Amino acid sequence: MMDERNTLFSQKLFADAIELIWREAELLDRKDYHEWLTLWDPAGFYVVPIEPDATDFAATLNYAYDDRDMREKRVQRMTSGYSASASDAARTVRTVSRFTLTSDASDEVTVNSAQVIVAYKRGKATLFAADLTHRIGFASGEPRIAQKVIRLIDSTDALSAIGFLL
């Protein structure tokens, strides 16, 4: 009976984590960056590594390695109207799927998934594909993103037009 209860609990956390990941994608597509910030654990990190196999993000070069302060500054730049990424931002549609629960505990789960973003700007559509890893914490009672790692499939190539959050 205990195993069944633990399985049901894990399934509930997994479902809640997927719901949060989909909510995040929706907010980013709507450019509701201030609401997106509320999804985060204050100690969380938003990471877009360059090297496909990087694990020590603090010691490697990344496209983004944002703690709370840097996430807030990025959102401020994107919503101020003064930067090119704000005034001429691409319209995006995200699809997130292939969810796999890779670890679970009573207060945190790790979910791997795949994401495809279509970004439309100046009459041109650009595709971005990535493997995502979300660490979702539940310590506060509500799911919060503790870490999001976006591993772009072409991260070692020269990338352009990433003037939005992935």
Image: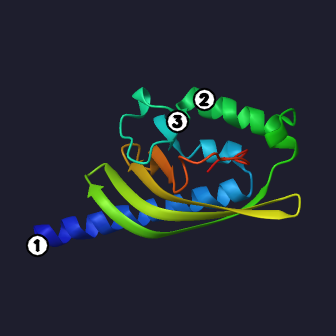
Q: Earlier in the sequence, mark 2 or mark 3?
A: 3
Residue 48 versus residue 46: which sits nearer the camera? 48
Residue 153 versus residue 1: which sits nearer the camera? 153
Residue 41 seen in the current view: no
The residue lying at 47 percent from left, 56 percent from top is: 132
Q: Position of residue 17 (x, y in %)?
A: 43, 59
34 relative to 122 in the view: left or right: left
Up the image or down, 14 lies above or below 4; here it is above
Density class for disc 3 (Cα within 10 Å; few <14, some 14-19, many ≥20) is some
According to the picture, the residue beneath numbered tag 3 turns out to be: 62
Q: Amino acid at mark 1?
A: Met
Q: Nearer the viewer, mark 2 or mark 3?
A: 3
According to the picture, the residue beneath numbered tag 1 turns out to be: 1
Q: Position of residue 89 (x, y in %)?
A: 81, 49
Residue 70 seen in the current view: yes
Q: Amino acid at mark 2?
A: Met
In the rendered structure, are the residues bearing label 2 and label 3 in contact, judged by CB atoms less than 8 Å apart? no
Q: Secondary structure at mark 3?
A: strand
Residue 163 versus residue 134: which sits nearer the camera? 163
Q: What label sits on residue 70 in the rendered view?
A: 2
Q: Earlier in the sequence, mark 2 or mark 1?
A: 1
